[in-house]
Every structure is written in C-alpha cells, then in structure tokens.
Amino acid sequence: MRENPWRPRGIAVRIALLSLLVTAVALAVIAIGVLGVAQSTFNRLMLEAGQPAATAHAMFDHSVVPVFVVAAAIAAIVSLLLASLLALRLAGPLDDIARAARRVAGGEYQARVQRSGPNEVTSLADSFNQMAESLQQQERMRREFIVNAAHELSTPLTNLQGYLEALRDGVIAPSTKQFQSLHEEVDRLVRLSQSLNMLAEDSGESISRTLQTIDLVPAVRAAVELASPSFDGKSIRVELNLPDRLPARSDPDQLAQVLANLLQNASRYTPDGGMVRVAAEARRNDVLVTVTNTGQAIPQQDLPHVFERFYRVEKSRDRAHGGAGIGLAIVKQLVEATGGRVGAESHTGVTRFWFSLPA
C-alpha cells in the first residue's frame, strides 16, 4: 500500500495549527483591550486636553493601530516557526519509529531506532528497541526449535524405518536384539513427546495447587540412588552434603523430575572417573539445592542460554555428549512454577547447577 506523504507530518501540521489558534485567541484578547478600551481612554484624554474628537481618533489610528498590526503579524510568524520546530522535533522520531514498526511487522526483527527527541519520545524508542530485540530472540529460538525438533524426530524414525524395511525384505532375521533396538528407538520418541508436552503445558497453576511441605533429604537421596547406574558405569564418585532434615514446599513428582534431569545432565557431562557433588541447605526464605560436577566448563557465551528449549552447548548433535536440549528447560519451568529460581555457574573444571524452593 502506498504511503500517504501527508500522514507522517500530520502531527506537525496539527501542532502548527493549534499554535496559530492559540496565537489568534491571544491577539483577539489584546485587540479588544487595545483597540477597544485603550482607544476610548486615549480619546477621553485627548478631549480633556482640548483636542477635537476627530483629531484624537485620527492620531490613534495612525500611531497605535499600525504598531499593533505589525506586532500581531510578528507574533503570528514567530509562533508558527516555534510550533513548526517543536512539531518537527516530535514528528521526526515518531516517523522513524513508525517506519521501523512496519519493518518489524514485515519480519525484519533487526530493525532499531535512534534515541532522539524529548524524554517521552526517547523512552518510546527504548521500549520499541527492547520489543524488537525480544522478537528477534523469539524468532531465533523458534528457528532453532524447528531445526532441533526435526533432527530429534528424524534420527529415531530413520532407524525405525531402516530396521522395519530390513525385517520386511528379509535382510535381517527377527531376533530379541533387533526388537530391543526397535523398542529403544520407540522409547526415545515417547520420551521426546512427553518432554514436549510438558514444555507446552501451562502448568504453573496446576503445580501451585499441588504444593505440599515435604522433606527434601529423602527425595534427593532417592534421586541419586536411581541415577547411580549411570554414575557407576563411568566410575563417577558421588558426594552428598545434606542435613538431617530439610522441609520445603514442592510437588514430589515434579521435584523427582527436576532432580532426575539435573543428575542425568551431570552424568552425561562428567568424564570417566570424575566427581559429582549434590548438596542442599536451608536459607532465610527458601532452600537451595546444588548439583556440581567436574569436567569441561560451559563457555561463558553459552551459559545464559543453557535453560532455553533445545539449546545445546555441544553443537555436534552427538547424543553421547548431549541430549535433546529439553531437560534443563523442563527444570526451569517446573522450578519457577513453584515460585523458585534456577541458575548455573561454570568455571575451569567445575560446573554447578542450582535451584531454590520456597521453605
């Protein structure tokens, strides 16, 4: 659609017209005072001084009226100029924001505007840039989600297709080992589907209704016990630093999911013979649970994104060194739904994930 060339400056025209209207009203008030009240006073004084009325009237018309007309014209011109400058100062940045908004609406999420104009306009520009940055990040996450979801689905489906075609054509004979491989691929698809459903659910309200006070210590010990086969398989030493009792408000099933995901993440990224330390402590208003593992540190540029959906620090897509990139996103969603927080820290040789729960 062709842009109306008068529309961007509509505010400038309206401000200029409004300024002229104000000036006209002011001049009308002054005219009444000067040409009405002042003229009668002048005529009365001239009559008292012995001058004829016609002479007094002519003197007023030739001395005061021209000055008033010139002053009124100058006032109107100055008012118009000042109004135009103010209008352009407002209309220019607003026009830039309008153009940038149309670009963002067309998919150009990198569009930004310069900060200029009064404080209110610069605040609007800041808000627009913040919105555009957020939309750009959301678009990046959407694209990464599509790419990663397609890969996570295609790998097991390709394996299933290959096995089934080989079984159909008699290339391989049915065996317990083959069916076990098929079952593992199906399990991968089921787990991925369940994880996606969990991420898609707006579960904050449902979780808040099921919160209860539980002892965190047995829950942590049980989660570590369930994860022990993966640690034993890599000769990883596990240390527990837990108090005798630690009450917290949470949902037992959701808490088990959070702990299982964090321990699975620690097992995956801890090298053979490394160490994992699980600790919990009471703080003033909440409780803190940490899972620390030795191994390669997470790059600092990746650290702020580790809780994003489908984000992988390991970009190779090798499942031996990285999962689907959903586990930590689920941890964040479940913990924040209970009113807690999550975080991660990583330095040379040590990575620490933590979450808090209301006490």
Image (cartoon, rainbow, N blue to C red):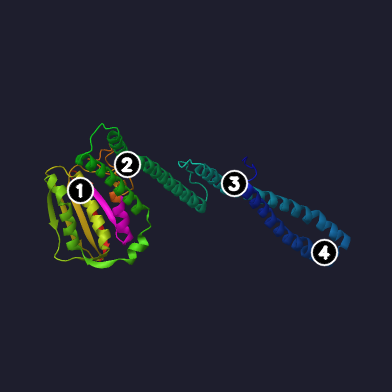
Q: Which amino acid type is shown beneath numbered disc 2?
A: Glu
Q: Say how many tags the image has.
A: 4
Give the label on residue 152, or none: 2
Q: Identify the residue at horizontal 72%, vertical 60% (top origin).
A: 30
First in residue order: circle 4 vs circle 3: 4
Depth check, mark 1 against mark 2: the one in front is 2
- Where does residue 67 sit, x and y in percent of width and height? 75, 53
Task: Please state, as top left, top right, bottom left or bottom right, where the N terminus lies in the image.
Answer: top right
Question: Badge 2: few (under 14), some or many (20 or more) residues near its Cα, within 10 Å?
Answer: many
Disc 1 from disc 4: Cα separation: 101 Å
Dot 4: element: helix
Crowding at dot 1, Cα within 10 Å, few <14 / some 14-19 / many 20+, comes out as: many
Residue named by callout 3:
88
Occupied quadrant, residue 46:
bottom right
- The mark nearer the N terminus, 1 or 2, is 2
Q: Nearer the viewer, mark 3 or mark 1?
A: 1
Label 1 and label 2: CA atoms lie apart by: 21 Å
Res. 52 visible in picture? no
Residue 306 falls within the magenta-colored stretch: no
Residue 359 location, x and y as percent?
Answer: 25, 66
Of residue 186 and residue 302, the one placed in the foreground of this image is: 186
Of callouts 2 and 4, the N-terminal one = 4
Residue position marked by numbered label 1 in the rendering: 266
What number is the disc on residue 43?
4
Residue plotted at (71% across, 59% down): 25
